[in-house]
Amino acid sequence: MATKTADTKNAGTTDGFTAQERAAMKERAAELRAEGKKGAKLADGLQDLLDKIAAMAPDDRALAERVHVAVTTTAPDLLPKTWYGMPAYANADGKVVLFFQDSGKFNYRYSTLGFQDAANLDDGDMWAASFALLRWSPAVEKKVVALVKAAVS
């Protein structure tokens, strides 16, 4: 997994993907391409998502990478892709379930984890559909994993 930073301001955060994690994702993309047309489309979606994450500012990139790991570990059936230029994850029908919007996209002070109507987060007549992300921590990871689990249930 990713290494911890020594920065006390962002204690508990990670500095992003390790070289081994990046290599494994590239290998997986190559495997998908080798599977044929459908696999190539999945590999292209994954590569587009990884390219978008790589282009982010360092703090946003670290958050996006941790979100990516949490989503792909928790809901491996979701398909990585980009959506309006943002990393996103779609269901088998191709409908976006959730997305990550980095703070630099619209010069916001925080990044956002957002859910679309394909997510099963309904709770009465009103519920949250997006969440501000400032830093990654074990508590944030636990909340993200719970939201992803609920979204795909």
Image (cartoon, grey):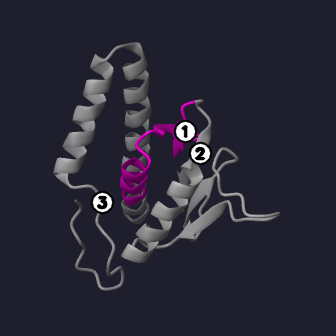
- The residue carrying mark 2 is 97
- The residue carrying mark 3 is 16
Please, what is the three-letter code of the amino acid marked with disc 1? Ala
Q: Is residue 96 above or below residue 29?
A: below
- The residue carrying mark 1 is 90
Magenta highlight range: 65-92
Secondary structure under tag 1 reads: strand
Q: Is residue 53 left or right of residue 134?
A: left
Kindly give the residue lying farthest to the bottom in the view shown. Answer: 8
Q: Is residue 31 above or below residue 68?
A: above
Q: Are marks 3 and 1 in contact (CB under 8 Å)?
A: no
Please, what is the three-letter code of the amino acid marked with disc 3? Gly
Please, what is the three-letter code of the amino acid marked with disc 2? Val
The residue located at (42%, 18%) in the rendering is 38
Q: Nearer the viewer, residue 77 or 3?
A: 77
Q: Nearer the viewer, residue 8 or 93?
A: 93
Give the CA distance from mark 2 to mark 3.
23 Å
